[in-house]
Image (cartoon, rainbow, N blue to C red):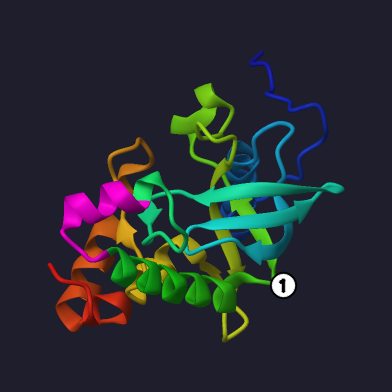
């Protein structure tokens, strides 16, 4: 007699469309559980947009600094990276700072005060999902204008307020999407690309 597979709780017997729906829900539950890293927040509230690509998120009784995976916005404050970016891009530092403040304003309007869901990429598991500055590396979902959840990382690039940052490892499909969105934003002169010299 064949042994019946059990999962520790009784599964309802289902056939046809009901079986398909149950299977989809089970798989979705497994995928969602893989996205949340142990000990790290899965949901919270965006307290502050520090700049165009960094947030402070309140969750679990503390505030977390969160770096948005896969995007890079101009610096909004003087720092070593501003100097490097000015040399690399041949942009005037004052222009970079001004555009960085615009990117921060866009991210603030998109994210601040909103409930959010944090999604982690397995490529960052070895570092505890943190960058070298101790910021969480995450994809952050917030509620959009129409009430549906939107991925802040892609929305910022789509609107032309960030470039795709693909030199670090993360999901290849997301990398391709961010690069496509940047190309479209540049071609249409959206956001910062109206002024950025390229």
Give the magenta range.
82-92
Q: Is residue 20 left or right of residue 192?
A: right
Res 28 visible: no
Vertically, is 100 above or below 57?
below
* Dot 1: element: loop
Residue 185 vs residue 145, the one in the foreground: 185
Chief secondary structure of the magenta portion? helix
Residue at (59, 35) in percent of width and height? 134
Res 58 visible: yes
Quarter assignment of residue 48:
bottom right
- List the residue tagged with mark 1: 113
Residue 164 vs residue 174, the one in the foreground: 164
Residue at (18, 57) in percent of width and height? 89
Quarter assignment of residue 72:
bottom left
Quarter of the rendering occupied by the C terminus: bottom left
Vertically, is 160 above or below 128?
below
84 in the magenta segment = yes
Residue 50 vs residue 44, the one in the foreground: 50
Few, some or many residues within 10 Å of mark 1 (<14, 14–19, 20+): some
Residue at (59, 49) in percent of width and height? 66
Provide residue 83's location: percent of width, then percent of height. 31, 50
Provide residue 65's location: percent of width, then percent of height. 64, 48
Residue at (18, 50) in percent of width and height? 88
């Amino acid at each position: 007699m064949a042994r019946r597979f059990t999962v520790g709780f009784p599964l309802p017997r289902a056939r046809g469309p009901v079986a398909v729906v149950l299977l989809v829900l089970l798989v979705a539950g497994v995928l969602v559980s893989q996205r949340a890293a142990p000990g790290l927040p899965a949901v919270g509230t965006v307290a502050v947009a520090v700049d165009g690509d960094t947030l402070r998120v309140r969750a679990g009784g503390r505030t977390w600094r969160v770096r948005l995976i896969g995007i890079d916005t101009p610096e909004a404050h003087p720092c070593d990276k501003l100097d490097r970016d000015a040399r690399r891009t041949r942009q005037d530092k004052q222009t970079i700072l001004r555009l960085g403040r615009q990117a921060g304003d866009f991210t603030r309007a998109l994210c601040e005060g909103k409930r959010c869901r944090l999604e982690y990429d397995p490529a960052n598991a070895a570092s505890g999902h943190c960058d070298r500055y101790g910021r969480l590396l995450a994809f952050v979902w917030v509620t959009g204008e129409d009430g549906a959840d939107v991925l802040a990382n892609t929305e910022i690039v789509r609107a032309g307020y960030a470039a795709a940052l693909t030199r670090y490892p993360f999901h290849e499909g997301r990398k391709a999407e961010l690069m496509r969105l940047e190309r479209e934003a540049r071609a249409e002169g959206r956001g910062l690309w109206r002024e950025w010299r390229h």
